[in-house]
Image (tube, helix red, strand yellow):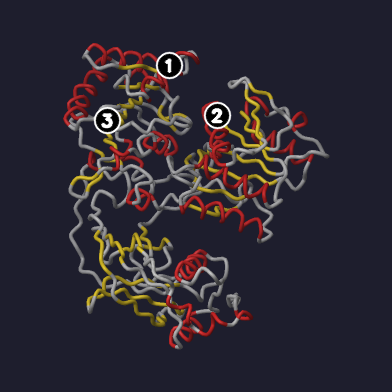
Amino acid sequence: MILRPYQQEAIQSVCDYVDAGNPGNPLVVAPTGSGKSLLQAGIIQQFLDTGKAKRVICLAHVKELIQQNLDKMIKIWPEAHVGAYSAGLGKSDTRRAILFCGIQSVWNKARKLASTTQPIDVVFIDECHRVPFIEGGTYRRFIDDLTALNPKLRVIGLTATPYRYVPGTKTHTGGYQSLIVGENRIFTDIVYDLSRSLVSLIQDDYLAALWPTPTQYRVNLKGVRIENGDYKADQLNALMGSADVINAILDAAIPLAQADDRKHWLVFCTGVEGAKSTAQNLRDRGISAVVVTGETSARDRETAIREFQAGQVTALVSVNTLTTGFDAPLTDCLIVARPTLSPVMHVQLLGRGMRPTDEKISQEDGIRRGCLVLDFVGNIERHGPIDCLKLKGPSVKKQEPTKECPACHAVIRIFASVCPECGYEFPAREPEPIQPPSANQSAIIAGISDMKPPVRYAVTRVAYSKHTSGKSGIPTLRVDYYDGFFRLASEWVCLDHPKGTYPRKKAETWWKERMPKVVSMLPGGVDQAMDWIKTGYTLNAPEFITLRTAAEKSYPEIVRYEWPDAPHPALTHPLYRQPENHHVPLATHP
């Protein structure tokens, strides 16, 4: 099975982190629907193939995730020595090299699964934001017991939402901290983060777009108390389960969904009775519906989900049970009747609609069909875009607006005229009047609502030059793409940045994609790269590039390169005829 490019990059990032001798526990942040199960499987295969580990355990909190992760492992590596320990799955394997386990089934069984002679080398935790900050709990107990058997145990986490609620104290208010990594945390470093790349994943058809539509009705939550970081359950259930609220939501939702020809609705409710009433209300209106709650038997739950996945029913109504481990790509409409103050819950709910299908990635006038989102409770306005959340908490500083540097992709202050990482100078832009957004038209994904359709251009010439910012003083390799005399776009390659930094790694990848595959030669920096180019070294140039310009940006972004099939022109350069020069190490900068 061929993994997607970003999945391969994520796997390599984890391997590079370990190979560099880092003793910490890495974290991979990947959006819902981007294939975390395949990422995990790929990392496991690399670790076992290269001797980084002999035995691993993969933890998850629901049986659906356990089964999904197990299936993807076998798909990636059919010969793998795998097993499972999960009461929900009726499995109790203990001595396989790769074990997929339910945390509730194994939290007190470390010595049954491992020993000092057959230790566990790596623990993977899916949905690792569930691991508490404080000592204790099932995850911490299990990890501590395994560490007692193997002090070199490493923990690797995967999540789409790297933050968690922190209870308030006498001196501090509670809130959601921005990261689950750092001091006094299990995870020490984020080694790969796709959370700010949602637009690119959607443009590449790896994820489906989410389209919010204004609704004529909004539930008034005034008077509902807040408790432990979210709305008080009994008060919320009473409000959202009332006949008046359910009728008002469905009166508004059904015409919108039907007018847009949406056939597979996922309805998120609050409270078991409210969910049952919503499902019955839908059926009374002639719309087929099934309901899944925590009270639903395993058999009935599986039947309901199977019918929805097969397209046999229009609406699947749920309460806090289909936010993780649920895979239904056909979902093309989300009806959100579940208010929440939790950014984790918000992201997980919306993520259910992002798995792509041919129908959802189809385009009309450059706009993807995607998944319709009908938010009747203000979650989108409350939390902001899912790739740029409004986080509030005791350790979260007030977040000022940011933007992404087109050269090194660092996230910097929105008013910066020069990127502090690579020295890229942003072109001047005339100020525009600020128009406050409508509450019901808040963006779900930052920038996608005003994204112009990408345009494909032929490239006739590529020019290279050394660019040094007057403010940062860091040189970069400037690359200009032309169609005749018209400059299409520019990019800046950060060959002089410190080794191991994100801009430097991006630069190395950029160079390797353009040099002949028969060698592994990299320049020591911008000066050496320019020397090579001036003496006849020719980097492979794309025949076409695809550009995209967001409304809030004044420059185009290159989203795709198309390469020629002809032999690489640089093979004639003298450097490639000297075997002793096959590898020129990159310069090391402090």
- Find disc 3 in the rendering and name its residue: 376
Give the percent coordinates (x, y) of residue 486. Answer: 22, 76
Left or right of residue 370, residue 400 in this image: right
Q: Looking at the image, is mark 3 or mark 2 nearer the viewer? A: 2
Q: Dot 1 lies on which element?
A: helix
Left or right of residue 567, residue 185 in this image: right
Q: Is residue 128 above or below residue 567?
A: above
User: Which residue does the image show at 52% across and 32% down from the upper left?
Assistant: 68
Instruction: Give the mark, 1 or 3, whose residue is nearer the N terminus.
Output: 1
Residue 320, image quadrant: top left
- Find disc 1 in the rendering and name its residue: 303
Instruction: Give the mark, 1 or 2, whose residue is nearer the N terminus.
Output: 2
- Residue 285 is at least partly visible in this image: yes
Left or right of residue 155, residue 342 in this image: left
Instruction: Give the mark, 3 or 2, whose residue is nearer the N terminus.
Output: 2
- Residue 170 is at least partly visible in this image: no
Q: CA distance from mark 1 to mark 3?
A: 28 Å
Disc on res. 374: none
In terms of depth relative to the viewer, which is nearer, 68 or 572? Answer: 572
- Find disc 2 in the rendering and name its residue: 67
